[in-house]
Image (cartoon, rainbow, N blue to C red):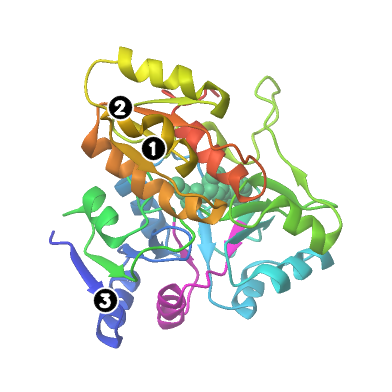
Amino acid sequence: METKIEKITADSLAVAKKIIFEGGVVAMPTETVYGLGGNAFDDAAVQRIFAVKGRPSDNPLIAHVHTDYDLLKIIDYDPPYAKKLREAFLPGPLTLVYPSTGKVSPYVSCGLNTLAVRIPSHEGAQAFLKAVDIPIVAPSANVSKHVSPTSAQHVFEDFNEKIPLILDGGACEGGIESTVCDVTGEIPVILRPGLVTREQIAAVVGDCGEYTPDLSAKEKVKSPGVLYKHYSPRCKTVLFSAEETQKAIAACRAETGRVAVLGEHAILAFVADMGIPFLDLGETETEMASRLYDLLREAEKVCDVLIAVEPKKQDGVMVGVLNRLRKACVSTDIPH
Ligand code: AMP
Ligand code: MG
């Protein structure tokens, strides 16, 4: 199958719509990362997404819609604080997890009794969702466990000849995936950190929890995605804390194979005269989020061993960035 990359126009949207209604998958840009989209009502289309990505069958998908009105068509229970969150952050990089209603394919939620929904703000995503006018399930458009894609070219690298169409909306500004927030309980609980921070959510609704799975308990894990190795470049990747920068540099010297260092701009001074490629995450938290995946993909091209140094700032958006960096360095899935 030929994989076309097309700018978003009336013509390419018409082709995309046809593919979606025939049960196919189309890659679409969002403000976070690119997604691999399919018809949320179509069992076979949803199953196709899992197959194309090689995604574990217990890791549920997020349904994307273009307006609040469309969101309300696929959920029932809507606590007042969830409405406040939608008003404050949507369209945008916040996914809300509601009790499921059985209105989309059961394959979307993978046996959980909840459904994750988001309204992306990206102009191209909005145009696509408006054109198809149905909920689109769209996991990140990377082969399972690989680094998430922030450009049409990244999607092409993972899915050339596997999908018919990539809608090209340019580089994703946000750069890491949406914050996933459970709204089934009394207060919102973050299941996956992202661009909308815990502090921002708490400022709107007064309180916000953070979920950490109890792997020893028998209870079903609320967000299976947390258990999987993810975001990983195809090179050995090790992570050091900022305090261990010197140790990281010594490790660079000891490693065999091509070595590169990834870290915030401030550590450039330590690596500048070592003759080692430095992948510069930048200075601000939003810069670091938006560059992270591009640099992890760059790493697998320029080195065999990537030494990642944790940025000093660890709150706000950096919670999400560090969550991705730590998972990128895990060598296997967590047994569950
Ligand atoms: P991705 O599509 O690759 O961005 O991953 C989606 C993330 O959302 C994964 O971490 C999933 O586990 C999580 N997710 C999707 N649906 C649900 C749900 N119903 N409940 C909890 N987490 C979910
Ligand atoms: Mg993903």
- Name the amino acid, label 3: Lys
Residue 296: quadrant of the picture:
top left
For image coordinates 22% across by 38% down, the residue present is 301
Q: Note whether ligand 2 is within 8 Å of mark 2.
A: no
Give the Cα separation between the discs numbered 1 and 3. Answer: 27 Å
For image coordinates 23% across by 58% down, the residue present is 163
Identify whether 196 is placed above or below 145. Answer: below
What residue is disc 3 on? Answer: 7
Mark closer to the observer (1, 2): 2
- Name the amino acid, label 1: Lys
Region rendered in magenta: 116-138
Name the mark on residue 125: none
Name which of mark 2 and mark 3 comes first in the sequence.
3
What residue is disc 1 on? Answer: 145
Give the Cα separation between the discs numbered 1 and 2. Answer: 31 Å
Give the Cα separation between the discs numbered 2 and 3. Answer: 41 Å
- Name the amino acid, label 2: Met
Name which of mark 1 and mark 2 comes first in the sequence.
1
Horizontal placement of 319 versus 147: left or right? right
Mark closer to the observer (1, 3): 3
Residue 4: quadrant of the picture:
bottom left
The answer to whether residue 225 is visible is no
Residue 216: quadrant of the picture:
top right
Say if mark 1 contacts mark 2, CB within 8 Å: no
| Viewer-nearest residue: 152 or 333 | 152
Name the mark on residue 274: 2
Based on the picture, tell me whether residue 2 belongs to the magenta stretch: no
